Image (cartoon, rainbow, N blue to C red):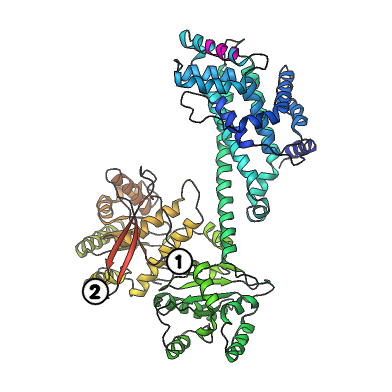
Amino acid sequence: MSTEEDTLLKQIIDLHKPDGREIDVKSLLQLVRFITLFTDQTPDEPSPDVSKTVQSVTYYISELHKTMQDRSKGEGTHDTFMSLLPVITKFSWDAKLVLVLASFAMNHGVWMMAKMYSANSPALKDKDHDKLYKLLGFSQPKRLELDDAYYFYLSLIHSFSKRPKKNQLPKPALTELFQALTRVAECIIQLHELPAADLEINVPAYFIAMFRMPVAVYGLIKIVVHCAAVVTRFPSNDYEISVAEEKELSEYADQLNRQSKVYTDLINACNRVIEEIAADKAYQIPEISHVDNREALEFLIKGGDDKGLHTVADTLISRLKGKHVLLLVSDEESPREEIFFLKHIYQEAIRLGKQQLSILWVPVNSGLGMGTDHQFKTQSKSMPWYSVPHPSLISEKAAKFIKENWRFQSKTNTLVVLDPQGTVVNINAFHMLWIWGTQAFPFTRSRERALWRTQDLNMEFLMAGSDPRLIQPEVKKYTFLYGGDDIEWVRKFTTTVKRVADDMGIPLELMYVGKSSKGDRTKSSKIENAIRMEKLSFVLDNKLQCWLFWTRLRSMLISKMSHQRGLESEDWTTRQLKWLLGYETEKSWAVLGDGEVTHGLGSTVLQVLTMCDKTRISEADSFIDMFRSLKKKVLESERVCCQVEFPIPSMWMPDMMRCPDPGCKLEMMDERIVFQCCHPSPSRTPTRVPDLM
C-alpha cells in the first residue's frame, strides 16, 4: 500500500466507529437495484420486509441526501465523502456503501427511472402500473402525496415517449455503471458474511481484501457522489450528459467490472476453503486431544478384547508415534496394481534415505468374508511396511468411521494421511503420490496447490514413472505418444511420422501406449505385438505401465478439478487433461511434445502431418509450433467430441464436468452409464461416463 493510501486509510478508520448495529443490507440493495435499473423487464419487486428496513434507516438516508446536496456545489468528491462518513460512522463497511446507494436511489431514482424507462419502453404497459406505484412509495419526495407523485411521474414518461429529444435517447453509461456498482456491493456483502476467523489464515487474499475494504468503499462512494452530481442536474440541463461525462462513467464501469471479477474469484476461493474446512472436520477422528497421533492410532487399531494383541498394538503405536503415517485402507478384493506401485515408491524412498513415509496397512472387512488368518498373514508379509497385528483389532466403531467418514468403499484402496498430531490431512493421498511421488510429502492441500503452481504439462511430466527411454531432458528431441486399437492407422501414422522427421531433419521418437482396462488389454496386446514384430516404434512395456499412465492422468484431472470448484472457467491444463484422458476410449490418437504438448485424434493428426513441410516450419518457431498452427486450421472445419470415463466404484468421480472445448455451446458434459464386459475376465464392471456428443 502506498504512503498516500496509508494516510487515506488512517483518515477513514478514524471516522469508523461501528457499534454492532445491523440492517438488512440485502433487501436494501435489492431496492436500490429495483429503482436505479428499472425497466419493463425488471423481474422482482422489493421484498415485503424492505419497508421496515427503509423505515429503520430513513434518518440516515435523509441526512446522507442533505449532505450530498449541500456539498454538490463546488466541493470535490473526497471532501463530500469525508462529510458523509460521520453520518454512517456506526455501521459496518458493507452497510455504509448500501446506505449511500439507497440514499441516491430514493432521492434521485425518479429521474433515472424516467429516463431509463422511456428509453427502454416508450409505451407504459398496464401490468407495470402497480409495480411503479409501489416503487414510488420508496422514491417519492416527502412533500408530495403518493398519487400526486405517481401522476407526475406518468406525465414525465408521457412527455418522454411522445416527444423524445436527441439527448433523451438511451445513454447506457449511467445504467451500466449502476449495474457494476450493485454487483460490487453484492460482492462486498458476501465477503462480510464469510467466516473471517477461518479465512484470514487460510486465504491471504481475503485478509488483504478486508484490510483494504475501507479504501475500496471510499472509492465506490466517491463514484456514487459523482453520479449524484450528474443526476442532480436533471431536468434543469434538459437531461444532457456530455460526451466527456459519458466516457468517465464508462471508465468507472470498466473499473468496477474488473473489481467485481476479482471479488467473485476471491469469494469462490473462500467458499472452496470453507468447504475443505468443513470436510476436514468430518474426516477427523472424534474425541482425541491431538497432542500426538497415539490416540488416533489407538482408535483405529486397538479395538477388540484380546489383551495380548493390545500389547502388540501398543508396541506398533509407539513406533509410529510422532510420525506422519499413511494408512493404507483396503479389503480382500482391492486392486493389486496400486499396491504394486506403492511398494515401488516406498522402497525407492527408503533407498534414497527418505524416512518420512511410514505406511500402516489397515485391512477393513467388506462384509464378504475376510478369509483365513493364513490369507491375512500372507498378505501382511508381502508388504514392506507396517500392518495391523490382526484384523480383529479394528473395532466395528472404527470400521464404520472409516467407511462413512473417510468414504471407503469395497474393492478399492485408499491412502489416508495422519500428521504427527493425529490430524487427518488427506483422505486419499494416492492421487498426489501417483502424480509427484514422494515430492508430494506431507500430502496436504496446500502442498498440492504449491506443486501445481510450479508444474507445467509437458512430456516429461506425462511420462514420469512410465518409461525412462522418453525422459532424457539433456537430449533435445520430439516425442509422439500414440494409441488406439486400429492397426492400419498405426502403420500409416508411424510411416508418415518417420517420413516427416527425415524430410525435416528433426529427432523424433514414437511410443505406443496401450489401454488400461482388462477388456481393452486384449486388443492392445495384439497391437503391441504387431508394432514389435514390424519394428514400428517403442511400446510402453507392460500392462502395469499402461495402468500407471492412465491412472496418473485421471489423478491429475481429479486433483486439478478439486482446486477449481466454483470457478467460472477452468485453466488450460485442466482442459488438456480432459482431452488426454478422453483418448483412452478412442480408436486412434496422438500427443506430440518436446517441452510443451499438443494432441489430437488420429484422423486430425494424420491430416496435419500431411501438411507439414520445410517451408512451413521456417515460418514458425519450432516444429511443435508449426504442428499446433496447422492443427488449429484443421479443427476449424471439424467438430471433436470428448468422453471421459471413471470406473465404478470410484468415490473420486466429479459430480459434473465442463466440456474442455471453450467454444462449446452445451458447456456441461452429459453423464451416462456404460456396462462394459471385461473379457477375458468373467467380471463385469459398470462405468460412469461423462460424455459430450
Q: Residues within 10 Å of mark 1 (few under 14, many from 20)?
A: few
Disc 2 residue type (three-letter): Asn
Q: Nearer the viewer, residue 325 or 395?
A: 395
- Looking at the image, do the residues carrying marks 2 and 1 touch, with CB atoms under 8 Å apart? no
Position of the N terminus, as image quadrant, is top right
Q: Main structural element of the magenta stretch: helix, strand or loop?
A: helix
- Upstream in the sequence, badge 2 or badge 1? 1
The residue carrying mark 2 is 529
- Rendered residue at 46%/20% (across/down): 120
Residue span colored magenta: 148-155
* Disc 2, SS: helix
* Residue 244 seen: no
- Corner quadrant of residue 488: bottom left
* Residue 154 part of the magenta segment: yes
- Rendered residue at 54%/62% (across/down): 448
Eye-nearest disc, 2 or 1: 2
Q: Is residue 405 left or right of residue 471?
A: right
Relative to 210, does residue 503 appear above or below in the rendering?
below
Question: Where is residue 558 drawn, in percent x and y?
Answer: 45, 60
Relative to 214, does residue 685 appear above or below in the rendering?
below
- Rendered residue at 50%/53% (across/down): 564
Relative to 464, does residue 396 appear above or below in the rendering?
below
Question: Where is residue 494 drawn, in percent x and y?
Answer: 25, 63
Disc 1 residue type (three-letter): Glu
Question: Where is residue 274 drawn, in percent x and y?
Answer: 59, 54
- Corner quadrant of residue 371: bottom left
Relative to 312, does residue 589 appear above or below in the rendering?
above
Q: Nearer the viewer, residue 502 or 412?
A: 412
Q: Residues within 10 Å of mark 2 (few under 14, many from 20)?
A: few
Q: Is residue 359 left or right of residue 66?
A: left
Q: Which mark is residue 474?
A: 1
* Disc 1, SS: loop
